[in-house]
């Protein structure tokens, strides 16, 4: 039992820890007939769901013709 308790404690701790990390959003747009790509880092640790929302905000911003995808 003494050997199992630490393993169970580590497994439970891992289950309750959120997986947050820095993400990169890759945005493409046309300029002068050529396609340009810009990568933007989140700068803070985000969950994947929040990172998708953050990256989508670039697509729906005031810029026209910009498409962004989470990398």
Image (cartoon, rainbow, N blue to C red):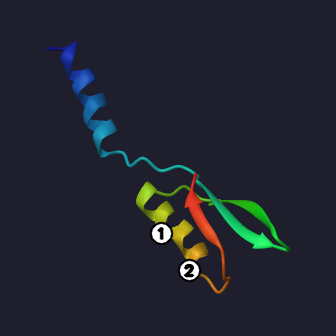
**Upstream in the sequence, badge 2 or badge 1?**
1
Give residue 62's quadrant in the image: bottom right
> Which residue appears at 66% of the width and 77% of the height?
65
Question: Along the line of sight, which residue is nearer the eye, 5 or 38?
Answer: 38
Identify the image quadrant of the N terminus.
top left
Task: Describe residue 42's horizontal placement relative to residue 16 as left or right.
Answer: right
Mark 2, residue position: 60
Give residue 43's quadrant in the image: bottom right
> Which residue appears at 50% of the width and 58% of the height?
46
Q: Residue furthest right?
A: 32
> Which residue appears at 26% of the width and 30% of the height?
9
Q: Residue furthest left?
A: 1
Mark 1, residue position: 53
For marks 2 and 1, give the CA distance.
10 Å
The vertical placement of 45 against 12, above or below, is below
Name the spot of residue 14 as percent of width and height, x first: 33, 37
Instruction: Identify the mark at residue 33; answer none if there is no mark.
Output: none
Name the spot of residue 44 as percent of width and height, x first: 59, 59
Q: Residue furthest bottom?
A: 62
Question: Along the line of sight, which residue is nearer the eye, 6 or 43?
Answer: 43
Secondary structure under tag 2 reads loop
Disc 2 crowd rating (10 Å Cα; few below 14, some 14-19, many 20+) is few
């Amino acid at each position: 039992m003494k050997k199992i308790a630490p393993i169970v404690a580590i497994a439970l701790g891992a289950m309750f820890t959120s997986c947050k990390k820095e993400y990169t959003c890759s945005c493409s747009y046309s300029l002068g007939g050529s396609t340009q790509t810009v990568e933007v880092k989140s700068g803070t640790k985000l969950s994947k769901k929040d990172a998708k929302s953050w990256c989508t905000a670039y697509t729906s911003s005031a810029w026209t013709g910009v498409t962004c995808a989470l990398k």
